[in-house]
Amino acid sequence: MISKKEIKLIRSLDRKKFRDREGIFVVEGEKSVEEALNSGLEILKLYRISEIGEKAMSRITLLNSPSPALALVRKPTLPDASQIATLIASRPLSLALDSIRDPGNLGTIIRLADWFGIGTIFASHDTVDCFNPKVVQATMGSIFRTKIIYCDLLQIVSEFRAAGMQVFGTFLEGRSIYEENLSSSGVIVMGSESHGISPALEKQVTHRLSIPSFSPASANAPDSLNVAIATAIICSEFRRR
């Protein structure tokens, strides 16, 4: 049996302020729960529909329909300044997300980063919470293999530049990514779905990239790409080199 107290706690974790207060997030779905169990993070509670029944699971799910499994997971400890400095000193290829607000887009980007072997994503403080249930669901378990660090992006890109690495940014009027010289280290800045990269951060970009359109009907072609789709193309081209 699930107590009313448990139900109230789980349902409250749909909101960021309660996830932050409790230090817990919800993982749903057999694959994602399996990834959580293998992640090394603390699993506080595991519910299976085969054990508690569909009716009980429907009372605690944060999705549109109950999943076969649901877990309460302790949020990981965020790296401190010295650990971030050590990470940057290792000269990785990283992503920086500037004001990404859509949970589905963020979840997909986390999954893409995992696919392309990009282990760290730096995110602005106004980017949607990576422990939002919709984000976690969209990652399909990749959230357990990718570091998402919420931080001051201006400071982070400045540290990459100070370490002698390049800062790549995506713009409609940038140089074609198929013609630009790319690097195996540095940081790729992806801007918000609505406004792109913020003006202050834009000034720190050393290489302005664009994804050219090949539409034969240029006058009626889309004026931009979804940020997750753009991230997939950008990451693929970086890794192809």
Image (cartoon, rainbow, N blue to C red):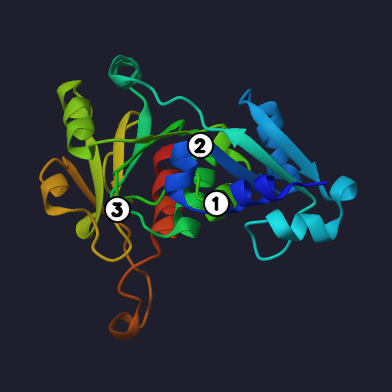
Give residue 99's mark.
3
Residue at (71, 35) in percent of width and height: 45
Amino acid at pointer 1: Ser
Amino acid at pointer 2: Glu
Amino acid at pointer 3: Ser
Residue nearer the viewer, 185 or 43: 43
The residue under label 1 is: 12
Q: Earlier in the sequence, mark 2 or mark 3?
A: 2
Residue at (61, 44) in percent of width and height: 26
Assign a secondary structure to mark 1.
Answer: helix
* Circle 1/circle 3 CB separation < 8 Å: no
Q: Is residue 99 above or below residue 65?
A: above
Residue nearer the viewer, 72 or 7: 7
CA–CA distance between discs 1 and 3?
Answer: 24 Å
Q: Is residue 175 above or below residue 30?
A: below
Is residue 130 visible in this depiction of the protein?
no
The residue under label 2 is: 22
Residue at (42, 47) in percent of width and height: 17
Q: Nearer the viewer, mark 1 or mark 3?
A: 1
* Circle 2/circle 3 CB separation < 8 Å: no
